[in-house]
Image: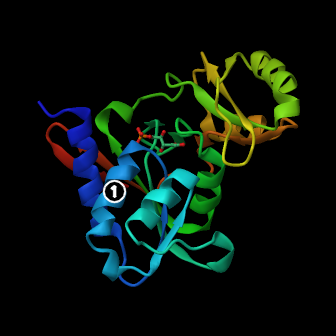
Amino acid sequence: MLTQDQLKLAVAKKALEFVPEDAIIGVGTGSTVNLFIEELAGIKGRIKGAVSSSEASTARLKAHHIPVFDLNEVEKLPVYIDGADEINHHLHMIKGGGAALTREKIVAGVADEFICIADEQKYVAMLGTFPLPIEVIPMARSYVARELVRLGGHPELRQGVTTDNGNVILDVHGLQIMKPVELEEIINHIAGVVTCGLFARRRADVLVLGKQSGVEVLR
Ligand code: 5RP
């Protein structure tokens, strides 16, 4: 029986197959991506560098002497490699467990292909068991929370967390997300919401899924 960490390592290694030669690639955030960065360090001579989705990943990339580019300097990212908190068979995701959702969504938006690396515990029939993270401008926190209650959720302020952009995170419990694309739009239209952790409009293109039976690649 492989542990969750062993499955994360297996997908981190497999993700190297999706790294194009001589390119700048997008790199996400989280414990699975941390393992991927370790693997990337072993082939760093093959890429030009990376655009990072968080201060934490930037620090790790730099510690391995992998050049980190500002997104504004880069016109094209062939791939963005990142984890997820939940992912369904449409490759819609919940992200933001590491509070990096806004920068993740921006970098993913630029990339031609989103490669999601996840272990099988993240692969779900319906999104919503993992509380949905929402990045919110601090002064709008209570208003946005009331609006989320109207949508049937139970928002909780993530204690002690300020995002890289200086905002707060509301984690919304109790949502059964049957229509991820629609819900993403509705939440993103509440004034004061910076980004909702649903990645449905920009879903993953490829899922590298770590299972007990081996690593599967789903499209
Ligand atoms: C960070 C994220 C991560 O991709 C997500 O939380 C998965 O993390 P991990 O690989 O540690 O399970 O969205 O904001």
Quadrant for the C terminus in the image: bottom left
Quadrant for the N terminus in the image: top left
Residue 48 spot, x, y in % from top left: 44, 81
Residue 77 spot, x, y in % from top left: 53, 73
Q: How many marks?
A: 1
Is the CB of the residue bearing disc 1 within 8 angstroms of ligand 1? no
Location of residue 197 by image quarter = top right
Asked if residue 216 shows in the view, the reply is no
Q: Amino acid at mark 1?
A: Phe
Identify which residue is drawn at 82% across, 38% down: 137
Location of residue 106 by image quarter = bottom right
Taking the image as shown, residue 103 lies to the left or right of residue 89, namely right
Taking the image as shown, residue 212 lies to the left or right of residue 167, namely left
Q: In this rendering, is residue 86 above or below 218?
A: above
Q: Which residue carries the number 1 mark?
A: 36
Asked if residue 52 shows in the view, the reply is yes
Residue 117 spot, x, y in % from top left: 36, 50
Residue 110 spot, x, y in % from top left: 61, 67
Identify which residue is drawn at 26% across, 34% down: 4
Identify which residue is drawn at 69% across, 74% down: 72
Identify which residue is drawn at 35% across, 82% down: 21
| Numbered disc 1: secondary structure | helix
Q: In this rendering, is residue 48 above or below 134?
A: below
Q: In this rendering, is residue 132 above or below 154?
A: below
Q: In this rendering, is residue 28 above or below 129?
A: below
